Image (tube, rainbow, N blue to C red):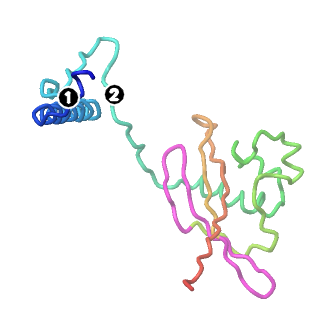
């Protein structure tokens, strides 16, 4: 027989083999931890700051535009849109106050057919009121409009989010309705 099996049977050899195995295991665990966490003691300093070049200025955080009161022209565009596009009457006037989001690439002739991207209210509208201005900037705004209409003997109210844009420059600038999104509440089931 060979000498190797008798060497491994001795008590001293078994103990040495155990210690060597533990050292290899500990070294492996340390190697894995260094790989995962990726930093050693010499690597704890902060990375060097990039040197500014003459061509590039440092990035500035985006600034929020200044809010302004909702203009009378934006209010008028909303009222005209509701009286025309929403009830599908006088669509030639609705064309003038409809933005690209409403027109969706349609020609004037297609728009005047009445098949437009506006949820209609077919019942007679009793009143439409801007009750909340979500935001208003110099070139865009969003308002919430409560539209009251008669359905049978009951009066119903539909809340609509209206997005407005200011198109053009100078004296040709005008407000248009770019989005018309009725608010639909999500029903919540009572707990059983």
The residue at 78%/59% (across/down) is 84
Nearest the camera: 167 or 2?
Answer: 2
Nearest the camera: 68 or 184?
Answer: 184
> Which quarter shows the N terminus?
top left
Residue 191 position within the rendered picture, expressed as x and y whole percent measured from the top left: 54, 83
**Badge 2 element:** loop
146 displayed left or right of 6: right
**Badge 1 element:** helix
Q: Residue furthest top?
A: 54
Picture disc at residue 59: 2
The residue at 71%/83% (across/down) is 155
Which of pointers 1 and 2 indicates the residue nearer the eye?
1
The residue at 32%/20% (across/down) is 57
Q: Residue furthest bottom?
A: 153
Mark 1 touching mark 2, by CB under 8 A? no
The residue at 65%/58% (across/down) is 78
155 inside magenta stretch? yes
Residue 141 position within the rendered picture, expressed as x and y whole percent measured from the top left: 54, 51
Residue 68 position within the rendered picture, expressed as x and y whole percent measured from the top left: 45, 51
Q: Residue beneath label 1, please?
A: 6
User: Magenta residues, as a range?
Assistant: 131-158
Q: Residue furthest front?
A: 1
115 displayed left or right of 82: right
Nearest the camera: 30 or 190?
Answer: 30
Q: Which secondary structure type mostly characterizes the magenta part of the structure? A: strand
136 displayed left or right of 178: left
Decide: is 179 above or below 35: below
Query: Does label 1 or label 2 sit earlier along the sequence?
Result: 1
């Amino acid at each position: 027989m060979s000498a190797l099996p008798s060497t491994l049977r001795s008590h001293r050899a078994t103990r040495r083999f155990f210690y060597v195995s533990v050292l290899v295991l500990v070294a492996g665990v340390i190697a894995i931890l260094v790989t995962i966490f990726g930093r050693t003691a010499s690597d704890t300093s902060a990375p060097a700051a990039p040197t500014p070049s003459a061509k590039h200025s440092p990035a500035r955080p985006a600034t929020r535009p200044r809010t302004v009161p909702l203009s009378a022209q934006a209010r008028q565009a909303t009222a005209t849109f509701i009286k025309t596009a929403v009830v599908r009457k006088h669509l030639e006037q609705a064309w003038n106050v409809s933005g690209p989001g409403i027109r969706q690439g349609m020609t004037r002739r297609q728009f005047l057919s009445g098949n437009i991207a506006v949820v209609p209210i077919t019942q007679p509208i009793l009143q439409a009121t801007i009750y909340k201005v979500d935001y208003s900037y110099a070139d865009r705004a969003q308002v919430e409009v409560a539209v009251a209409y008669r359905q049978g003997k009951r009066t119903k109210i539909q809340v609509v989010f209206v997005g407005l844009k200011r198109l053009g420059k100078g004296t040709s600038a005008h407000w248009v309705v770019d989005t018309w999104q009725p608010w639909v509440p999500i029903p919540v089931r009572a707990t059983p």
